[in-house]
Amino acid sequence: MSKRKTGDHPDLKMVNPAAAAIDIGSTMHMAAVNPSTCDMPVRAFGTFTQDLHALADWFLDCGVTSVAMESTGVYWIPAFEILEVSVFRVFRTSRLFW
């Protein structure tokens, strides 16, 4: 069986190629962009202010215009504030486990 590339799923169609996604964590944020925009479309970023600015800069370099983030706690707030100021349209979802 051959290994498929990221995003290589015939049943799914890309809706917004300028969108990015972030999984927010307490010590690390995992971010993903359209694979056609850079060589490494999934990256890990720290949670300090300088890391969040590096994340925003990477999104700008990749042509991102909107960001969806997933978070279970309050760790999304600093990322949201920096990304919102950087002219991104930011959407947040939360997971609840019972």
Image (cartoon, rainbow, N blue to C red):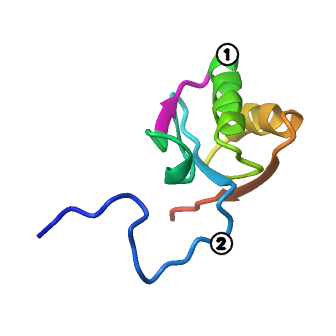
95 left or right of 57 in image: left
Above or below, 70 relative to 74: below
Element type where label 2 sits in the image = loop
> Does residue 34 appear in this view?
yes
Q: Residues within 10 Å of mark 2 (few under 14, many from 20)?
A: few
- Compute the Cα span from label 2 to label 1: 31 Å
In the image, which residues are magenta? 43-48
Q: Quick check: 27 left or right of 21?
A: left
Q: Which residue is mark 1?
A: 50
The x and y percentages for residue 48 are: 63, 19
Which kind of residue does numbered mark 2 sit on? Answer: Val
| Residue 89 x, y percent position in the rendering | 83, 51
Most extreme residue toward the left, as rendered? 1
The answer to whether 3 is drawn above or below residue 88 in the figure is below
- Taking depth in this image into account, of 58 and 26 the one nearest to the observer is 58
> Residue 36 shows which numbered tag?
none
Q: Which residue is mark 2?
A: 15
> Within 10 angstroms of label 1, few (less than 14), some, or many (20 or more) residues?
few
Quarter of the figure with residue 59: top right
Q: Is residue 93 left or right of residue 40?
A: right
